[in-house]
Image (cartoon, helix red, strand yellow):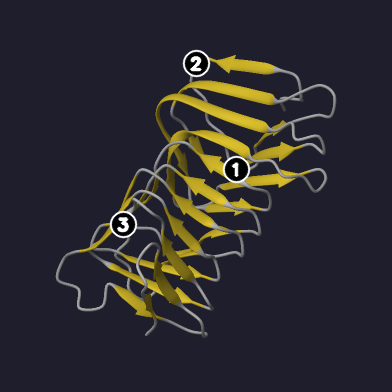
Amino acid sequence: IVPGGMSTTLSGTLANNVTGTIQLYGADFIGNATLTVANGFTNDGKIVLETASNGSSGTLNVGSGTLTNAATGVIRSQTAAPVNASNALNAQVTNLGLIDTAQDLTVTGTLTIPSSATGLMVTGAGALTLNGLTVNATNILNQPVIGGTGLLVTNGTSAINGGQLHIDGRDWNNAGDLTISGRVTFDNGVVLTNEPLATLTLAGTNATPIAQGTGAGNAVVVTGVDRLLNW
């Protein structure tokens, strides 16, 4: 546990097992809680980042390498009280487990969903802001799902690399360069908005790179162009 007002650095090897919890919680009148890990590691347990009512937050920094959230792992962004603030994960992240954005979470690296990933990957009512999303998943019968009701924001470079992805109920704002060469399926009223100066490229041989799933209201909005595509 790293409480508010403290900044801790780990230079050795870190492993968080199935029963372990790494918790960083900001505190009122004291400040942010920050943990810096020198090298990438695997999370099999829980990582909890928490904001306080005054906006102080939890921040996890990974200096080099990749933070791998294993199939049993949970990364949870939460808050002690309703507040307009975001917890931060400054790392390259490979996700096979669950990211729960009960509170807004900013990932300053790329979130990668690997080829073996299946099932629910993201949930929660908070926004998830990424500096890139890479999806390599290939399981057609049990596709990875980015769910929840908060906003998904992608900056930087993102790619659906011939893989499969479901977006369920979470609107998506692309503010970077997004290439879809696989298939993305929208469920339950998802709106993908391509922001001004952003690029959306449909590539590859997939005849339906953006597919209509369950529910109504799924759409793609290209900002700055008088066009709304429904299907």
Quadrant assignment for the N terminus: top right
Considering only order in the chain, which callout, 1 or 2, is on the residue closer to the N terminus? 2
Give coordinates of residue 54: x percent, y percent: 81, 34
Give coordinates of residue 6: x percent, y percent: 72, 18
Identify the residue under disc 2. 12
Q: Quadrant of residue 23?
A: top right
Q: Examine the rendered structure and indicate whether residue 164 appears above or below residue 43.
A: below
Identify the residue under disc 3. 115
Give the amino acid at mark 3: Ser
Identify the residue under disc 1. 45
- Between 154 and 99, the one nearer to me in the picture: 154
- Between 230 and 205, the one nearer to me in the picture: 230
Q: Is residue 143 visible?
A: no
- The answer for how far apart the CA atoms under marks 1 and 3 are is 22 Å
For the view shown, which residue lies furthest in the left direction?
A: 205
Q: Examine the rendered structure and indicate whether residue 192 appears above or below residue 89.
A: below
Give the amino acid at mark 2: Gly
Tell me which residue sits at (35%, 78%) in the image.
Answer: 211
- The answer for how far apart the CA atoms under marks 2 and 3 are is 30 Å
Specify whether 24 is left or right of 216. right
Give coordinates of residue 108: x percent, y percent: 47, 36
Tell me which residue sits at (43%, 66%) in the image.
Answer: 192
Specify whether 28 is left or right of 115. right
Q: Examine the rendered structure and indicate whether residue 215 appears above or below residue 165.
A: below
Which of discs 1 and 3 lies nearer the camera? The answer is 3
Helix, strand or loop at mark 3:
loop
Mark 1 is surrounded, within 10 Å at the Cα level, by few (under 14), some (14 to 19) or many (20 or more) other residues, namely many
Give the amino acid at mark 1: Gly
Asked whether the residues under the numbered discs 1 and 3 touch, taking CB atoms below 8 Å apart as contact, a structural biologist would say: no
- Between 93 and 44, the one nearer to me in the picture: 93
Q: Is residue 161 visible?
A: yes
